Amino acid sequence: MAVQISPSILSADFARLAEEAARVEGVADWLHVDVMDNHFVPNLTIGLPVVEALLRATPIPIDCHLMIQDPDRWAPAYAEAGAGSVTVHAEAAKAPVRTLRAIRAAGARSGFALNPATAIEVYEDLLPEIDMLLLMTVEPGFGGQKFLDVVLPKVTRARALIEKHGGEIWLQVDGGVSAETIERCAAAGADVFVAGNAVYAAEDPARAVQDLRALAELA
Ligand code: DX5
Ligand code: ZN
């Protein structure tokens, strides 16, 4: 499984998103966009119009993480707009099978996210519908939070379930991923790494992406 790095623009300057994207162009595999609605999480960020503008402004594939209350209603539109990956939360989706299929039908990779306290085992039968499983390593809502080690055993168990089922399912971790924590995540079986602060609070974001990748590949 190849290591992929997905810098989160939540930690970037929202007034200069095109420039911020350009700073990681050529080194980042994805640009992670955190959509928050102040209902599913206690924070409000950006939505579809900004994602559409970003898609025009950068060649980097967009990885949309929907932290919203009604993802069944909204997710397909992000895929139709051209996002390469669209992730909905298990805790919010009312019809996850239908929604994951709609994301795929619209041409994007289907992502399914679990909060730190949500177990993976009950979703085992859903794996064939999922192209990327996202395990939150902080409580969702804000960048710059402390990594939750308590999630690592779930990363290990999720990797084992993915191997058992076969097929190509990426395992993404999101929250508090940094030079200090990325090796632990990779060793547990994660292969796609979201990093907000670790990239955009760095003096040289491109260098930060390269350093994170090197650490993950070593683990
Ligand atoms: C948090 C978001 C993350 C956030 C990560 O709810 O889903 O994508 O941007 O930021 P860091 O890497 O700073 O924890
Ligand atoms: Zn995210």
Image (spheres, rainbow, N blue to C red):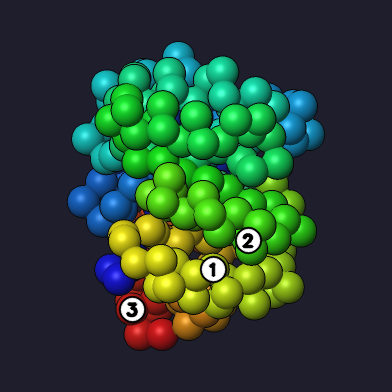
> Split into 4 quadrants, where in the image is the C terminus?
bottom left
Q: Is residue 81 above or below residue 135?
A: above
What whole-number distance in Å separates the C-alpha atoms at marks 3 and 1? 19 Å
Residue 181 is labelled as none
Residue 120 is labelled as 2
Of the residues shown, which amino acid type is indicated by label 2? Answer: Ile
> Split into 4 quadrants, where in the image is the N terminus?
bottom left
Q: Is residue 3 above or below residue 22?
A: below
Q: Which residue is mark 3?
A: 217
What whole-number distance in Å separates the C-alpha atoms at marks 1 and 2? 7 Å
The one of 7 and 91 positioned closer to us in this rendering: 91
Question: In the figure, residue 168 lies in which quadrant?
Answer: bottom left
Q: Of helix, strand and loop, which one carries label 2? A: loop
Of the residues shown, which amino acid type is indicated by label 3? Answer: Glu
x and y percent of residue 141 in the render?
Answer: 70, 42
Q: Which residue is mark 1?
A: 158
